[in-house]
Image: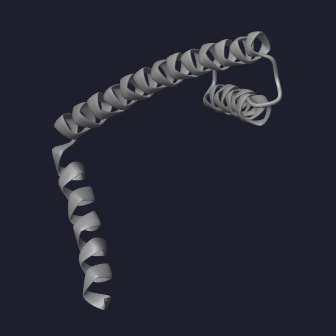
């Protein structure tokens, strides 16, 4: 699953959850208790599903971040002078930006 499709799926899940909750709130006083309970159950299930998907996405993001950090660490160990140069350049740019303020 690509990052864009995951993002779109989460967006669709959140929209569905919001629509369901909106329906529950709008119809809470106008619907019979059995129908209201059914809507509440639907909203609760949508919330659980959305939480699960968000948790899965967070875990995938953490894993991707960990892999990227490991690759960066490996690169710096293999090329220490380039790492020092990049760090110095970033420090120089940040220092120049902060002194202008």
Q: Is residue 37 left or right of residue 84?
A: right
Q: Is residue 64 above or below residue 41?
A: below
Q: Nearer the viewer, residue 97 or 31?
A: 31
Q: Position of residue 17 (x, y in %)?
A: 68, 27
Quadrant assignment, res 98: bottom left
Q: Position of residue 18 (x, y in %)?
A: 69, 34
Q: Is residue 68 above or below residue 44?
A: below
Q: Is residue 89 left or right of residue 64?
A: left
Q: Quadrant of the C terminus?
A: bottom left
Q: Nearer the viewer, residue 38 or 14?
A: 38
Quadrant assignment, res 100: bottom left
Q: Which residue is drawn at the image coordinates 69% and 13% (left, top)?
A: 37
Q: Is residue 50 above or below residue 38?
A: below
Q: Quadrant of the N terminus?
A: top right
Q: Nearer the viewer, residue 83 or 2?
A: 2
Q: Is residue 87 above or below residue 22?
A: below
Q: Is residue 12 left or right of residue 7?
A: right
Q: Nearer the viewer, residue 3 or 85?
A: 3
Q: Is residue 59 left or right of residue 23?
A: left
Q: Which residue is drawn at the image coordinates 51% and 16% (left, top)?
A: 52
Instruction: Determine the residue located farthest toward the bottom in the rendered image.
Output: 100
Number of marks in picture: 0
- Colour option used: one colour
Q: Position of residue 25 (x, y in %)?
A: 71, 34
Quadrant assignment, res 50: top right
């Amino acid at each position: 699953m690509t990052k864009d499709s995951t993002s779109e799926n989460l967006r669709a899940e959140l929209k569905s959850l919001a629509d369901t909750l909106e329906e529950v709130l709008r119809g809470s006083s106008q619907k019979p208790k059995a129908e209201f309970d059914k809507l509440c159950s639907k909203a609760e299930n949508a919330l659980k599903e959305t939480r699960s998907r968000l948790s899965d996405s967070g875990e995938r993001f953490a894993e991707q971040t960990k892999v990227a950090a490991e690759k960066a660490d490996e690169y710096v160990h293999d090329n220490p002078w380039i790492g020092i140069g990049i760090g110095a350049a970033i420090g120089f740019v940040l220092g120049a930006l902060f002194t202008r303020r």
